[in-house]
Amino acid sequence: MTRPRFGLYLCGAEQPRNLLVRKRLEALLEELYPQGIELAVVDIQNDPAAAETVGILAAPTLIRHWPDPELRIIGDFADAASIRLLLE
């Protein structure tokens, strides 16, 4: 069984704000997908080409690559209820 695939694009992945964003998102994804997920975290400061390839215009951005349709969510993921509705 293929697990859902996501990409999280951050600007400065080790900054405290972005560590909090990642922690919130990982907790929410674990709740929604107990079977597990694939999550690639990309620091666009270190890899701007990766962000350009997928058309990232703002950070943080979460992209659900699979299952279709592709979904993009931009923000700090503080509103878990809204994010949950988008991903369910």
Image (tube, grey):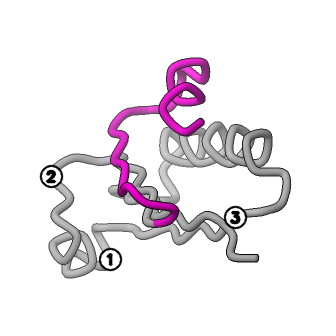
Q: Regarding mark 1 in the picture, which secondary structure is present there? A: loop
In the image, residue 4 sits, relative to residue 57, either above or below, namely below
Of tags 3 and 2, which is closer to the observer? Answer: 3
| Residue 77 counted in the magenta span | yes
- Which residue sits furthest right? 34
Magenta stretch: give its range: 66-88
* Residue 33, position as x, y percentages in the image: 75, 50
Instruction: Say which residue label 3 marks.
Output: 37
Q: Position of residue 10 (x, y in %)?
A: 38, 56
Q: Is residue 57 magenta?
A: no
Indicate the secondary structure of the residue bearing disc 3. Answer: loop
> Hey, what amino acid is under mark 2?
Leu
Q: Amino acid at mark 1?
A: Asn
Mark 3 or mark 1: whose residue is earlier in sequence? 3
Alpha carbons under labels 3 and 1: distance apart: 24 Å
Q: Is residue 57 left or right of residue 72?
A: left
Q: Secondary structure at mark 2?
A: loop
Instruction: Please identify the quarter of the rendering in which residue 47 is found.
Output: bottom left
Residue at mark 1: 46
| Residue that badge 2 annotates | 57
Measure the alpha-carbon separation of dots 3 and 2: 24 Å
Q: How many marks?
A: 3
Name the one closer to the observer, 70 or 43. Answer: 70
Q: Residue at x 19, y 81 (%)?
A: 49
Disc 3 marks a residue whose amino acid type is Ile
Q: Residue at x 53, y 71 (%)?
A: 40
For image coordinates 69% across by 38% down, the residue present is 28
